[in-house]
Amino acid sequence: MIRKIAFALALMVPTFGFTAELDLRPIARGELIVSPADQLIRPQARRAGNVALVPVVAERLRPKLRPYERPELAKGAETLPLLRAEKGLFAFSPTAPAISLGPQARSAAFVQAMADRQAAIIQGQVCSDPAIQGDAIGTVEGRGQCGIDNAVRIRSVAGVQLKPAARMDCQTAGALKNWVTNGVQPATDDQAASLRVVSGYSCRFRNSQASGRLSEHSFGRAIDIAGIGLKDGREITVLTGWNSARDGASLRQMWRAACNVFGTVLGPDSNRFHRDHFHFDTARYRSGSYCR
């Protein structure tokens, strides 16, 4: 019994100047309350007499909460102060590029060539649209009611050439450009290079008859297209391709796309007068587009 009491007293005596006392009351650390149980499993600050042994080494190595310099990454030109995003805050990774991967400065000859090309486009544009290339020809006189105000002669639309160039007004030119962009090119996988035009402005009656109502061709509001030339030199023709296995689907896709752009769309299935070409015009009807 005496030995047990002596052993218990020995455990309570300070050893080597350090205290074994623990404060079992909860300690407030900011918004966190540390329970006595937490204290038991955390290292306690040791004391030598009245002087606490502070873990200075651990405090010195503890990283700051904001970006800090990392000497182990300071290799090569990538970490020069002038190349850092924020001088003095952090160093780039050694794998970061030292030179921008952006476009290099272009030669003076290239810049001049592009300027000349842009000037040519601006000079050749009509209807205030660089995608419509041609010439402004002013008023086109015609018999009776025929004629065009502010007429243009169109050579190409959206990069696709008209063969031959056709006279029309700007509304029709704009509709033709939209059709080429949204109808012809998607139907040909962007391989269209030209349009074979069989009629532009022409003072005549509908369907080239001897009498009747004047055609929209008489006012520069219509165009007839018989074929689409491709970049490989082949031509898709309305006459031979409309019912063919090779080109029928593409031609019908073009025809349907025109119905969303023009006021009147006529093709081989409309009547015998259009079995070999598409007729497009920008006439407007109260009932909407006439597509047949």
Image (tube, rainbow, N blue to C red):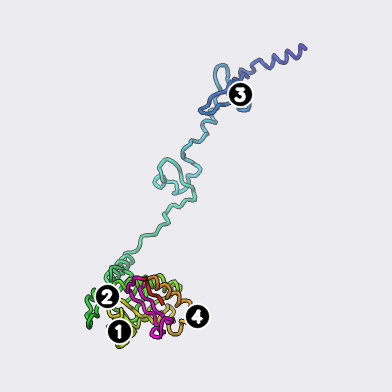
Task: Identify the amino acid type marked 2.
Answer: Val
Q: What element carries label 3?
A: helix
* Label 1 or label 4, whichever comes before in sequence order: 1
Where is mark 3, residue-wise?
36
Above or below residue 110? Residue 156 is below
Question: In the image, which residues are magenta?
Answer: 262-286
What's the CA distance linking mark 4 and mark 2?
A: 35 Å
- The local crowd at label 1, few if under 14, some if 14 to 19, many if 20 or more residues have their Cα within 10 Å, is few
User: Which residue in the protein does label 1 denote?
Assistant: 212
Predominant SS of the magenta segment: loop
Q: What residue type is labelled 4?
A: Arg
- Mark 3, mark 1: which one is toward the viewer? 1
Which quadrant, please, contains the C terminus? bottom left
**Comparing labels 1 and 4, the label whose residue is closer to the camera:** 1
Q: Work out how far the residue at label 1 is from the one at label 4, CA to CA, in angstroms.
A: 38 Å
| The N terminus sits in image quarter | top right
Q: In this view, does 59 lie to the left or right of 285?
A: right
Q: Mark 3 touching mark 1, by CB under 8 A?
A: no
Check disc 2 and report the residue beneath it. 152
